[in-house]
């Protein structure tokens, strides 16, 4: 489960990274209206959540005292370098923690806001949370990009071609994301 979860997290980060590469740095802070969260704000929130949830998971509650969640939803910086630093720092904490877990840790109880859950449940909870926000980032990037948007999945009207290529290959059992890494995607 740990290896598969790491692959899933990397996949969602990769989707967001590829979407972010298709917009201009000044678009990171674009808001469609006052209550809209810019991409920068989503990144601030994700980074704060990752650092809080995945730091010292066995000895501290996942909602750290030092976390200022409400501030994550206010513009903290407009500097693209700082925004991407937050993005990468959060993911680094997540991956470092997951890579140090073993299968025997999956049933251990950890706490988030004083609610106990197994490590495997926490991984699933955060996988859903982060994929939700990565989807928001992708959607916002697509809205902000020009007509030159590069599809991040099977391109429109290309399903038949994609399926043809897949069924030309020898059937084998492997993680469905392995082919993405082999293609250099």
Image (cartoon, rainbow, N blue to C red):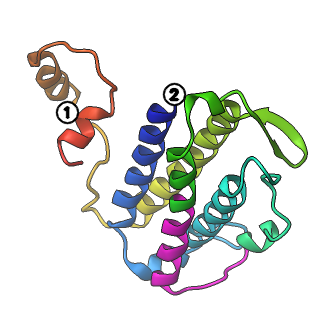
Q: Are marks 1 and 2 in contact (CB under 8 Å)?
A: no
**Residue at the disc numbered 2:** 1
Magenta stretch bounds:
74-91
Q: Is residue 135 left or right of residue 179?
A: right
Element assignment for label 2: loop
Q: Position of residue 107 (x, y in %)?
A: 70, 27
Magenta span contains residue 87:
yes
For residue 67, which numbered disc appears in the image? none
Can residue 153 be spotted in the picture?
yes
Q: Residues within 10 Å of mark 1 (few under 14, many from 20)?
A: few
Q: Position of residue 171 (x, y in %)?
A: 18, 12
The residue carrying mark 1 is 158
Q: Main secondary structure of the magenta part?
A: helix
Q: Is residue 130 above or below residue 92?
A: above
Placement of 116 over or under 51, stated as above or below: above
Q: Residue at x 33, y 27 (%)?
A: 176
Expressed as whole percent of the image width and height from the top left, the position of residue 174 reads 29, 22
Residue at 27% over, 36% down: 154
| Left or right position of 16 against 108 | left
Residue 123, how many percent across, how many down? 63, 38
Q: Earlier in the sequence, mark 1 or mark 2?
A: 2
């Amino acid at each position: 489960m740990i290896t598969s979860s790491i692959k899933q997290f990397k996949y969602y980060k990769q989707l967001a990274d590829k979407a972010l590469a298709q917009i201009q740095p000044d678009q990171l802070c674009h808001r469609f209206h006052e209550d809209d969260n810019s991409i920068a704000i989503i990144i601030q929130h994700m980074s704060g959540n990752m650092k809080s949830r995945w730091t010292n998971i066995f000895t501290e509650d996942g909602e750290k005292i030092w976390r200022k969640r409400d501030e994550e939803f206010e513009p903290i910086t407009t500097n693209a370098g700082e925004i991407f630093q937050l993005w990468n720092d959060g993911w680094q904490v997540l991956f470092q923690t997951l890579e140090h877990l073993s299968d025997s840790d999956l049933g251990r109880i950890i706490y988030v806001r004083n609610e106990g859950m197994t490590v495997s449940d926490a991984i699933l909870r955060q996988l859903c949370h982060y994929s939700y926000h990565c989807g928001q980032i992708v959607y916002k990037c697509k809205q902000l990009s020009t007509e030159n948007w590069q599809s991040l999945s099977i391109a429109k009207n290309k399903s038949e071609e994609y399926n043809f290529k897949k069924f030309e290959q020898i059937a084998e059992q492997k993680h469905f994301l392995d082919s993405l890494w082999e293609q250099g995607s």
